[in-house]
Amino acid sequence: MKYKSLVVLLFFSQLLLAQNKAAGVKLISATVQDWMTGAAPGRAGTTYTIKMQLLAAKGVVFKNLWIGNVHSDFEVQSFFTDPNKKPAKGDSVLLVHTKTSKPVSEVKENIPAPMEYKGEALLEYYVGGRPRYLVIKKFEKKKTIKGI
């Protein structure tokens, strides 16, 4: 009986490890920070930052981000001394979305998320041409930045 339990335990642990490797990315942190400028007429907004580590040897392409139920544009940032270097396995990247107070005429039509999720955001990305999804359960709230 012990032998069967050990085999089952090893099988499921290998399955979990394989799923983690298949994910292609690892979430390092997710933060949100409100900000406002001090000069009139003044602007305000919120910046969402998601730090990811790339685990896949194949290319990872970040496609879509939904924060709450709102499709959100984002920028992928990496910090290399060589501007031509592309992020590779082991590197970290930042996904940054800045939401500013915009006039109603500038608001885009919303694209619905491809699935329901429990969390504050959903990230769609591709590894080796295959779609993957990462649910960000909670953003860590940082202190508000206020301009002078």
Image: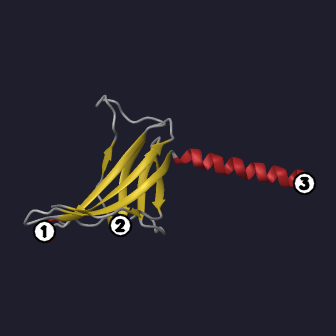
Whether tag 1 and tag 3 are in contact, CB under 8 A, the answer is no
Mark found first going from the N terminus, 3 or 2: 3
Question: Label 2 belongs to which residue?
Answer: 112
Number of labels in the image equals 3
Q: State the scheme by which the image is colored.
A: secondary structure
Viewer-proximal residue, 69 or 120? 120
In the picture as drawn, the residue positioned furthest to the right comes out as 1
Q: Residues within 10 Å of mark 3 (few under 14, many from 20)?
A: few
Inspect the image, locate mark 2, and give the three-letter code of the amino acid beneath it.
Pro
Q: Which of 129/15 is in front?
A: 15
In the rendering, at what x and y percent does residue 43 appear? 15, 64
What amino acid is found at the position of numbered circle 1 in the picture?
Ser
Viewer-side label of 3, 2: 3
**Could you say whether the residue bearing mark 1 is in a helix, strand or loop?**
helix
Snapshot quadrant of residue 120: bottom left
Q: Position of residue 97 (x, y in %)?
A: 30, 56
x 41%, y 57%: residue: 30
Task: State whether residue 38 is above or below residue 81.
Answer: below
Which residue is labeled 3 in the image?
2
Q: Badge 1: few (under 14), some or many (20 or more) residues near its Cα, within 10 Å?
A: few
Amino acid identity at mark 3: Lys
Q: Element type at marker 2?
A: loop
Mark 1 and mark 3: span between their CA atoms? 67 Å
Q: Which quarter of the picture shows residue 61?
A: top left
Question: What is the CA distance from the residue labelled 3 to the residue labelled 2?
Answer: 49 Å
Q: Is residue 139 left or right of residue 84?
A: right
Find residue 105 and name its label.
1
Task: Find the distance from the CA under tag 1 to the CA under tag 2.
Answer: 20 Å
Q: SS of the residue at dot 3?
A: helix
Q: Which tag is nearer the camera, tag 1 or tag 2?
A: 1
Position of the C terminus, as image quadrant, is bottom left
